[in-house]
Amino acid sequence: MTSDMTARMLRLLSLLQTRREWSGSDLAERLSVTARTVRRDVDRLRELGYPVDSARGHAGGYRLAAGTDLPPLLLDDDEAVAITVALRTAAGGLSGIEETALRALAKLEQVLPRRLRGQVTALHASLAGITWEDRGPRADPALLATLAVACRDHEVLTFDYAARHGTATARRAEPCHLVASGDLWYLLAHDTDKDDWRLFRLDRITAPTLTGRRVAPRPVPGGDAAAFVAGRLSSAPTRYRAIATVHAPAERIRARTQGLATRLRPVDDTTCLVDASDDHLSHIARILIGLDTAYTLDADPEVIDHLHETALRMLRATNRLPPA
């Protein structure tokens, strides 16, 4: 009897979430119960914290109202697949909501039925977006979801990690935070073998495995994960060095350019430094072009040559220079 009532209340909740308002008679017909039973089930939902409004009268209409807290939502199969694909896309590419989408994705994928996982993977793989520029390496949404669960549950993780020069090593770590910087995602974790904090680029992580061993969360040095990651990134070695002295206030550049939070340092009220150093020459060029203001550049010869060749191609394309 209890299981029947629970199933009926879940069905009632699902119906209330699909239409703005239901009459009592319609709900009773859908649930194969009396109008009195519908009223009792509505009262039980209210006791559980669901804000169900009712209109008096012959029809006895009901609707699920907005409340002070978001109650659990019931999704059918198609809705669950659609939301999961949307969250995977947002986590991998939309600026400003990546981390929020990632938390929601971790919750949803944890309870997603096995029968729907194949649909989600197939649909996400079939989607194609137009990219007008090389945005550099992107994180795999499935990997993001796995690491998000590991961070949330403080579960020890093993994975293979490729260094800058391609050499892969096996790692074992206690994951702490996922941090986005520009086009890249990083895992902040405590490396158990090295007994030290490490930053791992997600595009270099393969074969992540949850060990099932949970540990107490470690406090991040300094107490601020984002600030700690920013400090590590600013001192991390790169293949090519490129430092721009920009003739504009730091706040103006930060507001007009995405992904420079860890690369930007104020000099005075009218000048700032932008560290565009990177392992890829094309990425350096994209950062500098995005500044959209006057600057001077201190960079390696390879960077200067690449920028010079890029500028010549652009000038020839606009007939400002004769063909080579």
Image: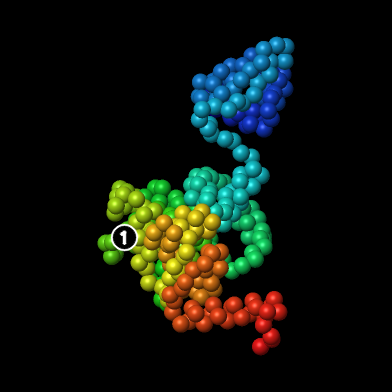
> Which residue is disc 1 drawn over?
197
- Above/below status of 180 relative to 35: below
Q: Quadrant of the N terminus?
A: top right
Query: In the depicted view, which residue is nearer to us: 13 or 247?
Result: 247
Image-based side of 69 in relation to 125, left or right: left
- Above/below status of 50 relative to 178: above
Q: Secondary structure at mark 1?
A: strand
The image quadrant that residue 44 belongs to is top right
Residue 142 appears in the picture as rendered: no
Residue sitting at x 34%, y 50%: 224
Residue sitting at x 28%, y 61%: 196
- Tell me if mark 1 has few (under 14), some (14-19) or many (20+) residues whose alpha carbon lies within 10 angstroms of its own: some
Position in image of residue 63 (x %, y %): 64, 24
Image-based side of 262 in relation to 121, left or right: left
Image-based side of 21 in relation to 287, left or right: right
Residue sitting at x 64%, y 40%: 76
Q: Quadrant of the C terminus?
A: bottom right
Residue 21 appears in the picture as rendered: yes
Position in image of residue 87 (x %, y %): 57, 49
Residue sitting at x 47%, y 71%: 296
The amino acid pointed to by label 1 is Trp
Position in image of residue 148 (x %, y %): 45, 52
- Above/below status of 297 relative to 94: below
Residue farthest toward the left in the current orientation of the protein: 195
Query: In the depicted view, which residue is nearer to us: 238 or 165?
Result: 238
Position in image of residue 248 (x %, y %): 48, 60
Query: In the depicted view, which residue is nearer to us: 318 or 204?
Result: 318
